[in-house]
Image (spheres, rainbow, N blue to C red):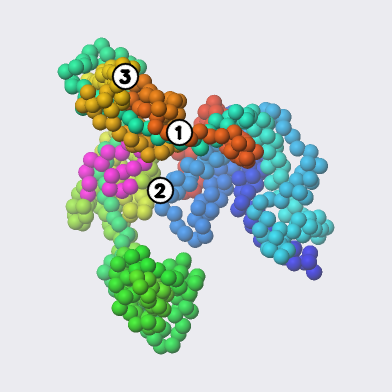
Amino acid sequence: MFMKQMRGSAKYVMGILTVAFVGWLVLSGINDIRTGGGGSQLNPVVGTVAGKDIHYSEWNPYLQNQLTVARQGDRSLTDEEVRVVTDRAWESLVSSTLLEAELERLGIEITDSEIREAFLNQPPPELLSHPAFQTDGKFDIEKYRRFFTDPSTDENTLLQIEAYYRSLLPRQKLQGLVEGGTYVSEQDAWRFYRDTNETARVRFVRVDPLTTVPDSAVAVTRAEVRAYYADHEDDFKVPATARTNMVSLALQPTAADTAAARERAAALRDRILGGEAFTDVATAESGDPATAANGGDMGPQARSDLDPVLAEAASKARIGRPTGPIETSFGFHVLQVDRRWGDSVALHQILVPVDVSGTTEDSVFSLMDELEGIALRTTLLAAADSLGIPVRTDIVLSDNSDFIPGAGALGVAPDWAFDPETEIGELSPFFENPTGFHVFELLGRQEGSIAAIEDVEPSIRQILLARKKKAEAARIAANITTAIASGASLDEAAGRLGWNVQESETFRRGDFVPGLGQGTEAIGAAFGTPVGSVSGVVDPGDAVAVLQVVDREDATREGFDQVKGALLDQLKSERTRDYVQQWLLALRKNATVEDDRARLQQGSNSF
């Protein structure tokens, strides 16, 4: 009976594996495709990674699965969301292909006995919580083993999980080799403990160069400007740009949609007044999933924590009787106040959001079709004018930014504008993102370049002027240390120059300290200068300062010894993660990757 129940769960088990391990399962079939398993259909190369071709038949299933996961069921994705998921999927497939090449280069192989050992003792994480393998709410390794070792278990299930392990285990070995390059010493752990536990408090004089040093006291020469420009050429790169006209149409609820939501909320209230239980109606009908799951129960609330409109309604409502509809920015609410005391209230709610109706959608889509039809015959400007739609002219798109003023994040638009196949004067498709639908008309493109020195000279002069003022301010501030060396106190030395002494709160090395910055030379001096002593001139970031340590609490070895073991484990884990990430980035940076997806037409609807 047990195995019958387990076999009945097989399709659900594989469903978990398919979603959770799609990367491994898809990639495990790549070699079959490369060796002829893909059949004789047209199967173009969409890219090349480290000399290995990635075919459409590999890329498209991988992408489609990522899109399915992103949709989280039946949720539709905007054009911008599709672009983001597609880019991430491509980078993921590139990384996996690079790992595969590295495994081949290092000759890492897995034996059948290693697979069996992992099969029996290393269950996929997503199966640990599956009900089929639970006993008294805990994962039961014996149930897991019996299921996968039973002779009647579907062979395809076993083969697919074996493919998962054949892909996973070599990568685990490779990661082990990479992680072998990390090491955390006790001294490393002590420094971390010290830096996060030591505290200091200081008094300091801060000298602002911009207000202390007049412009006339420093000068920047043309030669210095030219030298800075030559040394920082990358800072003056001007990205490629594209000039466009843009029309945006928001898919927003109309007055009719608002009225329909109000009527629905009133009908739900009437059902409760007619005898239905508030909790039953809320569970079935409320648009707020957080409270609907509890029958609309919002629990005790301070009135100040509620939307002001709800708070006012809750203060006037009859106890135990539904009231509404009450309109807020979230939609229409039906409330039932259970209890009031002091400034608090316990209540239930039903939320009816104001959704865009099918009629409204149809009208917007019809307007989009009409606008596009006219624009294709004339221009976007003329089409918008004929329909009375606002149009924004000369919207500049940049190839290094996904943000578009008035539209928000919409990287698909620059992708279209900078595509060599897009012609000047061409009309884009409508691109959708959370702010609405946006259509562009390409007016012109400008290649990226390096800004001319004449254009950036004023900003360079400001940078160099600030540097020279800071150096001059440091020279002036040195008078404080000179006076202190002659016997003056910090207050006396600062007072002679007309400066004030400030005092900090107690802080740790990693804290931001007003006036001293975060991670600056001044912060370091607070922990390196003896208590009661005055530092030299130090740099707090955008000024200069002299400080006196008032108090410091040093970390102790006794305290360190109590947490040393856990701290070493933590730092080892963090350093390993960072090291592996750097190794992967280096692998990606040094690899030759050719991306030909954009110019391929086959399967373009999937892209």
99 or 602, nearer to the observer: 99
| Label 2, label 1: how far apart the Cα atoms are | 52 Å
- Looking at the image, the residue that sits furthest to the top is 223
Label 2 neighbour load within 10 Å: few <14, some 14-19, many 20+: some
Q: Judge left or right: residue 602 versus residue 1.
A: left
Amino acid of disc 1: Arg
Q: Circle 2 sits on which residue?
A: 80
238 or 249, nearer to the observer: 238
- Percent x, y of residue 546: 33, 25
Q: Circle 1 sits on which residue?
A: 552
Picture quadrant of residue 44: top right
| Label 3, label 2: how far apart the Cα atoms are | 67 Å
Q: Is residue 184 magenta?
A: no
For residue 79, above or below residue 103: below
Residue 514 can be seen in this image: yes
Q: Name the residue: 43% across, 88% down.
A: 275
Residues drawn in magenta: 391-408
Give the mark, 3 or 2, whose residue is nearer the N terminus.
2
Q: Nearer the viewer, mark 1 or mark 3?
A: 3
Q: Which mark is residue 519?
A: none
Q: Circle 3 sits on which residue?
A: 487
Amino acid of disc 3: Gly
Q: Is residue 393 magenta?
A: yes
